[in-house]
Amino acid sequence: MIRSVNVVGAVIENHNGQFLCALRSSKMSMPNLWEFPGGKIKEGEKPETALIREIVEELGCTVKVGELVASVEHQYPEIKVNLKTFRAIIQNGQPKALEHSELRWVPKDELEKLNWAPADIPTVNKLKGS
């Protein structure tokens, strides 16, 4: 049986209309693919609470979570991912790549130039349309 995992991602936009994109490190599953930062939702945890916790762990800053951008179900060969992406605003600190290989601020019209993790592509497409 293929296991299923619930995850969240943060769509963080700066004052210049650029989005924070994170490159998965060689130690992560699906290395060298871009994603919106975030992670797994723990048992009994609300998605918004999980996102705040994950951003502290991954980026070392705090965010305020806004509206849902996309809810995606993606079937990888060995796992099914249920991803919810939310708009988020940095409240305290500067994002640092604590777990990722690289962080990059990318303008909306250049998002598709990155090699995205498949589950994040629907969010990229929504942002391009907004």
Image (cartoon, rainbow, N blue to C red):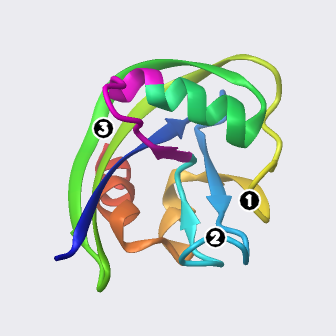
Count of labels in the image: 3
- Which residue position holds label 2? 28
Q: Earlier in the sequence, mark 1 or mark 2?
A: 2
Can you give x and y, in whole percent of width and height, for residue 98 in the image?
81, 48
Camera-side residue: 124 or 100?
100
Give the residue at x 39% y 58%: 124
Can you give x and y, in whole percent of width and height, for residue 72 in the image?
23, 54
Quadrant into which the N terminus falls: bottom left
Camera-side residue: 53 or 69?
53
Q: Earlier in the sequence, mark 2 or mark 3?
A: 2
Instruction: Determine whether, in the image, residue 120 is placed left or right of residue 22.
Output: left
Give the residue at x 49% y 39%: 11
Query: Judging from the image, what secondary structure is the residue with disc 3 in?
Result: strand
Give the residue at x 74% y 59%: 100
Magenta residues (range): 38-49
**What's the amino acid at mark 1?**
His
The reply to whether dot 1 and dot 2 touch (C-beta < 8 Å) is: yes
Q: Is residue 35 above or below residue 126?
A: below
Compute the Cα span from label 2 to label 3: 24 Å
Q: Count residues near mark 1 (Cα–Cα under 10 Å), then give few for <14, some for 14-19, many for 20+.
A: many
Instruction: Determine whether, in the image, residue 128 is placed left or right of residue 52.
Output: left
Instruction: Determine whether, in the image, residue 77 is placed left or right of residue 102.
Output: left
- Which residue position holds label 3? 69
The reply to whether dot 2 and dot 3 touch (C-beta < 8 Å) is: no
- Which residue position holds label 1? 100
Can you give x and y, in whole percent of width and height, for residue 74 in the image?
24, 67
Q: Nearer the viewer, mark 2 or mark 3?
A: 2
